[in-house]
Image (spheres, coloured by chain):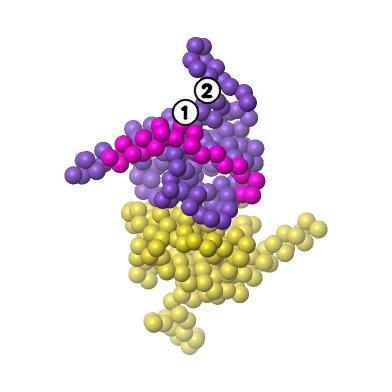
Chain colours: A yellow, B purple
Amino acid sequence: MRYYTFGDEPSISPDEFFMEEALREARQALAEDEIPIGAVVVAKGKIIGRGHNLTERLTDVSAHAEMQALTAAANYIGGKYLKDCTLYVTMEPCVMCAGASYWFQIGRIVFGAYDTRMGFGRINQKITHPKTLITGGIKENECAELVRDFFKSKRMKKG
Amino acid sequence: MRYYTFGDEPSISPDEFFMEEALREARQALAEDEIPIGAVVVAKGKIIGRGHNLTERLTDVSAHAEMQALTAAANYIGGKYLKDCTLYVTMEPCVMCAGASYWFQIGRIVFGAYDTRMGFGRINQKITHPKTLITGGIKENECAELVRDFFKSKRMKKG
């Protein structure tokens, strides 16, 4: 496994490196008062698509971070499929996004926090593409905390 | 049940009436050399969103008819949810589109042709919203034939 190193900092894995980029997108969502979920699509070590949740801004409940990043990546390469690409997303994708990843034939999905309620992992059948590899739990706490804090502050404002 | 009548023509049910509108969208897709699937979203007997498959034109494998029609409808009403609306679509929605319909909380889905391979019906768990009613098989043959003929002519061109 290759590791990126930055001077004296402890080395981090590529998955952690790119999840940090997805987290950067999530923080951007937070700054826009959106549910803080972010995603990037990576091909050969390069980010070719980015996105964060835009459901409020677009008044579109389907404007999830993954949908933005996947379509941006396909747009960038000018092709339909993302077979050799990895989707990094701070939260376990929902059924819609997992279903979208099937059509894009994404090579791999790496997610941060698990979502036991809405995540596609609750579906017992395979709904991602047969060739898609899945890794969960990268920077899990950081990804989960961002969303948890967001909803906590929303509830406090309401209360 | 109310029926729309048109002069001497035999009366048709509202479901058949609006499926015919979805078929109109599908035929538009066909004219654009897209997989001929169409959809409309109806609220109180009025079409508030239309769409057809745009995967080729947009080079976006997620640009399904349902996604277009659902976002168009939400855009039209300026709200997030489509609780009192019906989605008419010529083909059984895939997992992605069924997952999207969950987020829109669509009141009802009426589809034409069954899709045993990619349709959401292959999933044993409920992936649409708990309150979403489902009807399949409206104008089934007409909807299926359109897609079947499309792929047949594609294969003939290739061969």
| Nearest to viewer (mark 1 / mark 2) | 2
Q: Which residue is mark 1?
A: B20
Task: Determine if residue A26 is in view.
Answer: no
Image position, residue B136 (x, y; %): 51, 39
The chain that hosts pointer 2 is B
Q: Is residue B139 magenta?
A: yes
At horizontal 55% and vertical 59% (from top left) the residue drawn is A94
Helix or strand or loop: what does disc 2 sit on? loop
Q: Nearer the viewer, residue B139 or A107?
A: B139
Picture mark count: 2
Q: Which of the 4 quarters of the picture holds residue A2? A: bottom left
Q: Is residue A56 magenta?
A: no
At horizontal 54% and vertical 51% (from top left) the residue drawn is B99
- Which residue lies most toward the bottom here? A8
Q: Nearer the viewer, residue A12 or B156?
A: B156
In the image, residue A39 sits, relative to residue A7, either above or below, namely above
C-alpha distance separating marks 1 and 2:
10 Å
Q: Nearer the viewer, residue B92 or B22?
A: B92
In the rendered structure, find residue B142 and report the number of the disc placed on it: none
At horizontal 69% and vertical 62% (from top left) the residue drawn is A151
Q: Are marks 1 and 2 in contact (CB under 8 Å)?
A: yes
Image position, residue A147 (x, y; %): 64, 65
Label 1 neighbour load within 10 Å: few <14, some 14-19, many 20+: many
In the image, residue B13 sits, relative to residue A133, either above or below, namely above
**Disc 1 residue type?**
Glu
**Disc 2 residue type?**
Ile
Q: Which residue is mark 2?
A: B12
At horizontal 55% and vertical 25% (from top left) the residue drawn is B13
Segment tinted magenta in the rendering? B129-152
Task: Determine if residue A122 is in view.
Answer: yes
